[in-house]
Image (spheres, grey):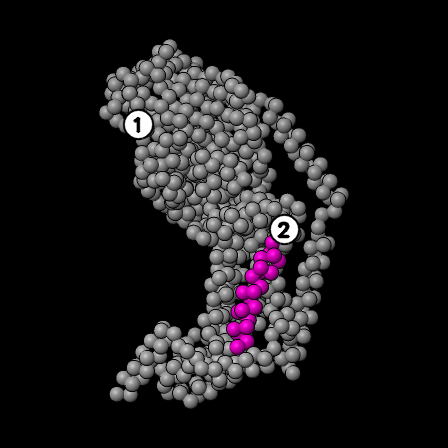
Amino acid sequence: MEEKKFDVQSIIGFVLIFGILVFMFYQNQPTPEELEAEKAKQEQVEATKASENSKTETVSNDVPQLDLRDSTAVANYQGKLGAFGFTKPSNDITTLENDVLLLRISNKGGQIVEAKMKQFVTYDSIPVYLVKDGNASFGLDFSTSDNRVLNTQDLYFEPSMTTDNGNQVLSLKAKTSSNQYLEYRYVMKPNDYLVDFTIKSKGLDNVISTSKPVQLDWKLKGIRHSKSIEYENRYTRLTYNHEDDKISKLSEGSDDEETEEDIKWVSYRQHFFSSILAADQPFKSGDLTSINLVEEESRTFGFTKEYASALPIELEGGEISKDLHWYFGPTDVDTLSKYKDLGLDDSIPFGWGIFGWINRYIFTPFYGLISSYFPYGIAIVIMTILVRLAMSPVTYKSYLSQAKMKVLKPEITELGEKYKDNAMKKQQETMKLYGKAGVSPMSGCIPAVIQMPIFYALFMFFPTSFALRQKSFLWADDLSSFDTIYQFPEGFSIPFYGDHVSLFPILASIAIFFYMMMTTGQNMPTQPGMPNMKFIMYLMPFMMLFFFNNYASGLSLYYFVSNMITIGIMLVIKNFILDNDKIHAQIQENKKKPKKENKFQKKMREMMEQAEAQKKK
């Protein structure tokens, strides 16, 4: 009678909590006026950006510049470069720009000194830069026939800007004569993050020495874009394609380096944005390095990791000819999937194995479909409900197994008392009881194992889904990052917890606690000499509270709603579907039926009997 009372109270409590949740969602959904205001605000931001783009900007970069007014310095510079001193020094910057990307390219070194995302801003509303203020460098190391060792970062290039079928084409040439040169050629297409990049030499077969390989060096320090540098750094990583489309990564938490063969592309991922260098024909080898720059959480530190790639380029007939591509843009599956021929979408961290497959081909498009009709937070709630309903048969099997075990508990306790001095015999008789009753103690674990791929796939989906970036819901201003209801004073942080308090993890931990109360609180045995499993299971929500405080609020929202729905499904199953008397009667019927052993069960029984006989001897 007391148990029935508890069940009714649980149902009432669940209904009240879920009703409050639904009411909160309804109350906090944007009104038509708010939507219109947000649209006007966005249009104003875009108009401001367009106005800024129409102005001449002064570019700050750390590329060392030659004082062109100092004739002696110019003469010394040209003398050091030998034949490459032919090109007239110039400190000019050339701009390539379309609707989504702005690149500034310096005559000094012919390299990109600024790469700006035009449609995205950081957490504090600053434009997203992947290259800025000397955080990146690019150049070719080579030796000349007159025994000079040069790097193109020290050379001056002569620019020439043209258009070709709507594409902007920038040719930069470091000349040794009027018709002998090393050329960097950039081609920017409209509304595209991918820029074609060709390195080609003409008439330099007698200038470039074959005694030392030509080596491409590309370095970049990842610029911070998120409010938590530790969180951003967790998903900032060097990824590369090599050896027939094999995808590998350097460590995300420590310094790492690798030497690989047949490298097709190298991605310097900065969580939601990537700088990628891809080749039409793979580099035969390469040395890749990643250095972790983040030691602790900081509100001011500006960089996450320092990347470096050294990629040898083979000469063809004494000349350089290499077709490459630069990608500066979002780490977004919809964008990167446009470049299937290069396989750039494989640089997205979906997860490994079957987990990544579920994330990539089920959850990502599924959520994209839902969020095209509903606000992003509501879309998470809807996806959670549909996932839990799809998994409800598994939940039913799990709870049915628990119900059967509960019915058998008095008999198992009796066996424990009867054979308390003989653990092997107790185990043998318990397994025999399970066999007669048609109950498998492992059947309760199987549903959990089935759900693990979904759990892990969602664990990777929420923090890395570009669709959730800077999308707000209720009190969370960014579903791809943690929500904050209280910020500790600067300099104060709780170990393993952080410098803020997030509400969604608290709600999720409470829901997990009640879920465990229902599933393990009544049936978890405590054996002498073994850890108190009840204590461990109750400790888990507390640990989850600490763990998820710094994770994506969308993930905590999912677990909160998921556990609330699961509790509701289990209450329905327990009170309206399962009947303990029928389960008991079915078990008694199973006991009467002759139980045929399979080979494995027979072998296990024989082994236990032999062990028992040996013990008696």
| SS at mark 2 in the image | helix
Percent from the top left, x then y, of residue 407? 53, 81
Label 1: how many residues lie within 10 Å, few (<14), some (14-19) or many (20+)?
some
Horizontal side of 126 relative to 293 (left or right) equals right
* Residue 434 shows up from this direction: yes
Percent from the top left, x then y, of residue 177? 35, 11
| 557 drawn magenta | no
- Foreground: 75 or 284? 284
> Which quadrant of the structure image shows residue 246?
top left
| SS at mark 1 in the image | loop
Residue at 62 percent of width and 63 percent of height? 565
86 over 138 or under it: above or below: above
Percent from the top left, x then y, of residue 287? 32, 37
| 384 drawn magenta | yes
Q: What is the chief secondary structure element of the magenta stretch?
A: helix
Magenta highlight range: 383-404
Which amino acid type is shown beneath numbered disc 1?
Answer: Glu
- Foreground: 451 or 291? 451
Q: Which residue is mark 2?
A: 379
Which mark identifies residue 314?
1
Residue at 36 percent of width and 73 percent of height? 600
Which residue of the protein is positioned furthest toward the bottom in this rendering?
418
Sequence-wise, the earlier of marks 1 and 2 is 1
